[in-house]
Image: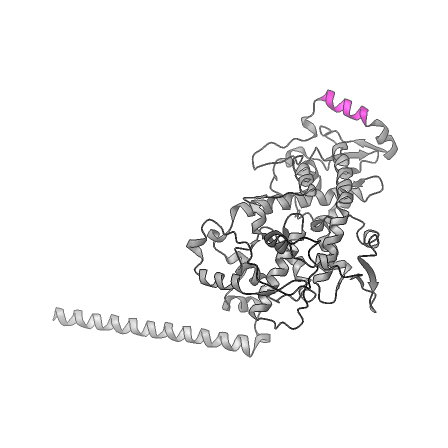
Amino acid sequence: MAVHIANSSNVLISNRYNVSLSLHLRLLCWNEFASYLYINHFPECWPRSQIRSMTSSKRVQDRSHLKRVHALEIATEKWKIAYKVLFLMETLRQEPEMIIPVRNLEQFRRQINLPKPHKVSDFIRKSPKLFELYKDQRGVLWCGMTKQAEDLVEEEEKIIEQQADKAAEYVTRFLMMSLDKRLPVDKIAHFRRDFGLPIDFRAKWVNNYPELFKVVKSEDETEYLELASWNPAWAVTELEKRVMGVTESTATHTPGLLSIPFPLKFPPNYKKIYRYGGKIDHFQKRSYLSPYADARGLKAGSLEFDKRAVSVMHELLNFTIEKRLVTDHLTHFRRELVMPQKLMRLLLKHVGIFYVSERGKRFSVFLTEAYEGPELINKCPLVLWKEKVMSLVGYRGKKKKIETFDDMSEMEYNSLAEDDSDSEQDTGCLKVNALDANTNDVEIGDTFKHVKGF
């Protein structure tokens, strides 16, 4: 009797399990069917949030932590900090007296990625060797640059002037790679700092080289930078120069097919992650069209089309001073440079040539061969200048004490005020005393709370 009851119980449990399994399978089938209807027939009837849950994501953030190159992520973090500081220096530089009310800087919160409730004054105070705070007779808080920062600004101007011819060459070669041999001036302006171009790039600089390019307007009043003359000596890729020893004096050939493999530099754990070594060999052996050759006949999505896109990206990154670009800026040139629509997927696929960093709101793509750890192998004068600026940024690490104006002794403060008394009289401003309890916008205690507020 007990055995019969036990068997009946097992049968009952088994039946319940089968029913549960059957319901689960039916539910899975229904979900698949609903997804099919949702994506293909009734997309307007469903919220976007549900669409994303039913599709497989291939975003950069979905990569495993093992696939990230820590050294290049460090380089990205350094660049993010440098961008914020340099943006503020440029903003001050464009002011008549190179000073600006702190409240006027509120409009630039998005550019420096400073969300509320973090104070702009705290952001400024984190770099006391570069920026100073002033208070006028009406109690308005102003920001200006230190003498050391102003000297650095002059130094940058001299370096940009010295490198102007090289920058003009890169802009010309950029135009030579484009489909119609012209590019919108507004789009090129995105690469101004990456190419080492001056602030007056649009207004003056583009008119300094009429033998290379000229500004033209379309019917809708859009300004384009158009190639003035083709230089066959510049229609040679940086890879050809480095691998084959081609120089400008010998480069008189018409650009066509190339068979030079790209330098590869994989992360240390590459073998544990990637399993398609054969595909890499086939890709490297495949011939491709030079970035300077006409690509109108290439079919989008073909192997030849994708490899030429890799060569264009490789050449463009070689033009930049840091061998790195923001991917948002690259997408603006997909049509002009005959690039694929899914450019990010192409960059992620060729991990040995490029590395995409996901830090911050904007992604950055690196030319891996140009880096040894987090440092550039060959640093141009502008990169060395930027490192000099970064050495004066007054915060490093999470717990390190940041110097502020209250760290000065009273004697140092008085002597500094006396040295700058003439300039203060000219601008009608008085230097802020950080110990003044009446300074409402300057709260010294808050300076140390949000070190990572950048």
Return the residue nearer the eye: 353 or 5. 353
Q: Which residue lies most toward the right here?
A: 426
Q: Is 243 situated left or right of 437 in this image?
A: left
Q: Which residues are the magenta region?
A: 410-420
Residue located 17% across and 69% down the image? 6
Return the residue nearer the eye: 74 or 128. 74
Residue 230, how many percent across, how many down? Answer: 76, 61
Position of residue 303 relative to residue 89, above or below, is below
Q: Which residue lies most toward the front here?
A: 250
Query: Is most of the magenta stretch helix, strand or loop?
Result: helix
Position of residue 71 relative to residue 312, above or below, is above
Q: Name the quadrant of the N terminus.
A: bottom left
How was this image coloured? one colour
Q: Residue 179's quadrant in the figure?
A: bottom right
Residue located 71% across and 58% down the image? 174
* Residue 363 appearing in the image: no
Residue 158, how many percent across, how many down? Answer: 78, 40
The answer to if 416 sits in the magenta stretch is yes
Position of residue 136 relative to residue 412, above or below, is below
